[in-house]
């Protein structure tokens, strides 16, 4: 259930990694897009997820969050299955994933982050409103609380999504391209926020496109191209050799294998 | 007397149903699932006929259960078509809707040929009717409507989240599949229960139109639901009223032969009138409001152009405010003499201008306004030249388009930037020189 699992991570937390992925394979319409991912990420790190288009970065996040079924493998959050640990997770989806003409205000959207702790049927109360207010202030959007979300710029919309994730009061955050289409000021604000989260002991996964900034932004990096190319501390992992392996053309063999699997049954 | 009171009951029942249809329909419209209710109602027809063939009874509950069964079967077939074949959703809806409806019409004519068929009067399910509705039917309809309203108001927060961002809802731990079933189930039940009054062909309109109309009036989901409920209730109630013998008795007119006119079309047309009113007259989103806003902007732009022309023509002799020939003004821009004179008259009425037959002169207030307008124009030009790298002989035209819409904070920001770069004159000369030659 949603409301009752608001407790802090159990004693297992002291030892278990924040996120463990074992042998995970994900398929869209029977066509595998991620093969055999194995990962263990310690707590309190900023982790960049990097790879070319179609490498499966969003798929990785969605599979971990249970938005896509796993063809095989398992995901553990602080040593426990995801379903038991949902309240520890904060999510910032891609900005384009929702209809920004939806009739809600900025404040409404941020309040959605608190729905988990509110639970079934009850409405957000004074405590939740306070949380939402604080989170909006953290992303510098307090003045926009009563705006309809369509009236915001791209960067402002991204900040609203961040505030909603903050309102989830999570231990681990997954952010899908939070820097896409934002202005320089917003990018700087987001980075500052990520660093604050890290100093509070949170773990943050960020799908990231700009290779220039990977070294300065992230402690750990996941290099992805349909399979895990490399994973580890940015210092030692984000090397020209690994980048070449990640971006040096699609892995045609994996592509062809996936295509073959898909074609085997014309009616899926 | 009895007929009148049952009609009143039906009206109240339909109004309640319309309110619920508006509320649940709002969610369907927001999720772009509006056509689901259309498919459901059409697909319900064979179920109604089969239920009658089996039980030989016209009981509303029995027929509704049949309708629900075949409506859901329609949704199942559509889902299978969409997910396991290459048929796209709109095509799948079209195929299922017409096939099920066709089967229903065939079954209807089979029933018609039976000895009991004529009394069954199942044809009224096509466009709806009020005459055959019993008090018990009204109670059933009203009861279902109230139950569905309760479900939606309890799950308001969950439905809102599900409609806006289903992925986020799933990640947060909500059982989105089950919530979706609750939402679509409520939609299905409201649609089915309205069939005897609105008919299978038009019931969907009562679900779709109120929500679509409500969107014009507000940017808040809560208010939108209330407006949709009111629109649905009025459409249901008013449409039923128009289709009853009541207006004939009240107004003594038989413009519409109400006894022959089914309520379905009248309900839909009433709803359509609400939609039309919303489309035209809603604040901000309505066509009239948008046209007025556009006109206001044009008027402001024209006024600002004139003020700037006046400022620039008097610029060489400032700080005096010289007299300017109308002919000189006329040469500045492409405006007709008539329009220019009309504008000059308006500015004079505002106290911005002194006029005589051939000449005009800015008053002190007019000069201040003209200086402001020119200042904004030149700030924007300077910005375009310095920061955006646009050639100075191109900049006048570009500045023209945008400068009239610049919000105050942005102008302040511009001032700060240009002042920081030492490009702004200090007081008392507030207006910077033009970055290009004035013609």
Image: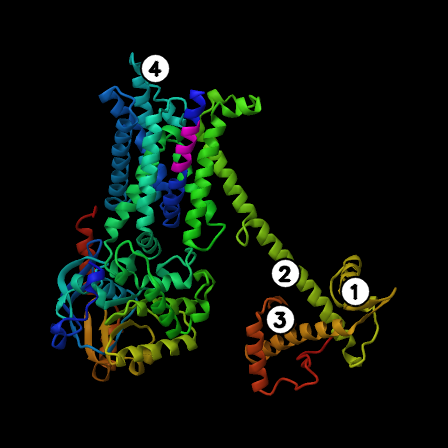
Badge 1 sits on which subunit? Answer: B
| Image position of B434 with respect to B82: above or below | below
Where is residue B41 drawn, in percent x and y?
34, 34
In the picture as drawn, the residue positioned furthest to the right comes out as B357
Marks 2 and 1: same chain?
Answer: yes
Question: Is A18 positioned to the left or the right of A49 in the image?
Answer: left
In the foreground, B251 or B324: B251
B256 or A100: which is nearer to us? B256
**B28 or A36: nearer the eye?**
B28
Q: Secondary structure at mark 3?
A: helix
For label 1, the residue is: B348
Q: Is residue B92 visible?
A: no
Marks 2 and 3, how far apart at CA: 16 Å
Q: Secondary structure at mark 4?
A: helix
The range drawn in magenta is B8-17
Report if residue B79 is visible in the image. Answer: yes
Of the two numbered discs 2 and 1 on the same chain, state the one appearing first in sequence. Answer: 2
| C-beta proximity under 8 Å, tags 4 and 3 | no
Q: Position of residue B212 (x, y in %)?
A: 45, 46
Chain hosting mark 2 = B
Q: Determine if the magenta segment contains residue B14.
A: yes
Q: Earlier in the sequence, mark 1 or mark 4?
A: 4
Any mark on residue B118, and which? 4
Q: Residues within 10 Å of mark 4 (few under 14, many from 20)?
A: few
Residue that numbered label 3 is attached to? B399
Q: Chain of mark 4?
A: B
Same chain, labels 2 and 4: yes
Q: CA distance from mark 2 to mark 1?
A: 20 Å
Q: How is the image coloured?
A: rainbow
Tell me the number on the disc at residue B437. Answer: none
Which callout, 4 or 3, points at the residue further toward the start of the chain? Answer: 4
């Amino acid at each position: 259930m949603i409301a009752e699992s608001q407790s802090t991570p159990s004693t297992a937390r002291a030892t278990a990694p924040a996120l463990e992925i074992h042998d995970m394979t994900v398929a869209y319409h029977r066509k595998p897009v991620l093969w055999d991912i194995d990962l263990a990420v310690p707590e309190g790190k900023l982790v960049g997820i990097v790879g070319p288009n179609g490498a499966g970065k969003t798929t990785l996040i969605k599979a971990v969050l249970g938005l896509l079924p796993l063809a095989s493998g398992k995901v553990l959050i602080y040593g426990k299955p995801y379903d038991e640990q949902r309240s520890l997770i904060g999510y910032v989806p891609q900005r384009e994933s929702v209809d920004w003409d939806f009739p809600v205000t900025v404040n409404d959207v941020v309040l959605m982050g608190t729905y988990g702790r509110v639970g079934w049927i009850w409405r957000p109360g004074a405590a939740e409103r306070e949380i939402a207010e604080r989170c909006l202030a953290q992303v510098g959007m307090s003045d926009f609380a009563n705006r309809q979300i369509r009236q915001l710029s791209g960067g402002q919309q991204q900040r609203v999504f961040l505030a909603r994730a903050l309102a989830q009061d999570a231990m681990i955050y997954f952010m899908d391209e939070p820097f896409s289409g934002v202005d320089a000021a917003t990018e700087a604000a987001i980075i500052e926020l990520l660093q604050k989260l890290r100093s509070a002991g949170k773990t943050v996964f960020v799908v990231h496109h700009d290779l220039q900034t990977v070294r300065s932004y992230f402690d750990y990096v996941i290099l992805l191209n349909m399979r895990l190319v490399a994973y580890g501390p940015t210092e030692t992992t984000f090397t020209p050799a690994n980048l070449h392996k990640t971006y040096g053309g699609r892995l045609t063999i994996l592509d062809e294998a996936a295509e073959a699997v898909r074609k085997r049954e014309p009616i899926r | 007397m009895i007929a009148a009171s049952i009609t009143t009951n039906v009206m109240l029942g339909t109004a309640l149903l319309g309110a619920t249809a508006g509320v649940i329909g709002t969610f369907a419209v927001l999720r772009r699932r509006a056509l689901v209710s259309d498919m459901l109602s059409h697909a319900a027809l064979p179920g109604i006929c089969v239920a009658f063939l089996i039980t030989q009874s016209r009981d509303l509950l029995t027929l509704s259960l049949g309708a629900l069964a075949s409506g859901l079967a329609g949704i199942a077939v559509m889902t299978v078509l969409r997910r396991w074949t290459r048929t796209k959703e709109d095509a799948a809806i079209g195929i299922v809707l017409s096939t099920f409806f066709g089967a229903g019409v065939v079954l209807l004519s089979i029933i018609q040929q039976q000895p009991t068929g004529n009394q069954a009067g199942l044809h009224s399910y096509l466009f709806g009717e009020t005459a055959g509705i019993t008090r018990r039917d009204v109670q059933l309809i009203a009861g279902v409507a109230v139950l569905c309203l309760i479900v939606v108001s309890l799950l308001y927060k969950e439905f809102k989240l599900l409609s806006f961002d289903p992925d986020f809802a799933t990640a947060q731990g909500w059982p989105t599949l089950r919530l979706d079933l609750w939402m679509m189930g409520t939609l299905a039940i409201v649609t089915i229960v309205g069939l005897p009054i609105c008919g299978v062909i038009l019931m969907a309109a009562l679900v779709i139109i109120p929500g679509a109309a409500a969107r014009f009036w507000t940017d808040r989901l809560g208010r939108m639901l209330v407006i949709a409920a009111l629109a649905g209730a009025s459409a249901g109630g008013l449409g039923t009223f128009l289709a009853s013998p009541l207006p004939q008795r009240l107004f003594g007119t038989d413009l519409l032969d109400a006894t022959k006119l089914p309520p379905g079309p009248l309900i839909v047309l009433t709803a359509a009138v609400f939609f039309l009113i919303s489309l035209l007259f809603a604040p901000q989103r309505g066509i009239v409001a948008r046209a007025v806003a556009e006109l206001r902007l044009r008027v402001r732009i024209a006024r600002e152009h004139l003020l700037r022309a006046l400022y620039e023509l008097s610029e060489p002799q400032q700080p005096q405010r010289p007299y300017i020939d109308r002919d000189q003004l006329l040469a500045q821009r492409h405006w007709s003499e008539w329009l220019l004179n009309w504008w000059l008259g308006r500015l004079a009425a505002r106290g911005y201008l002194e006029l005589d037959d051939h000449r005009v002169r800015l008053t002190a207030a007019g000069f201040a306004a003209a200086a402001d307008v020119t200042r904004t124009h030149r700030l924007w030009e300077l910005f375009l030249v310095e920061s955006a790298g646009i050639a100075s002989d191109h900049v006048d035209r570009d500045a023209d388009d945008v400068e009239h819409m610049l919000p105050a904070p942005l102008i302040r920001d511009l001032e700060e930037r240009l002042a920081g770069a030492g490009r702004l004159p200090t007081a008392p000369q507030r207006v910077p020189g033009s970055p290009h030659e004035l013609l």
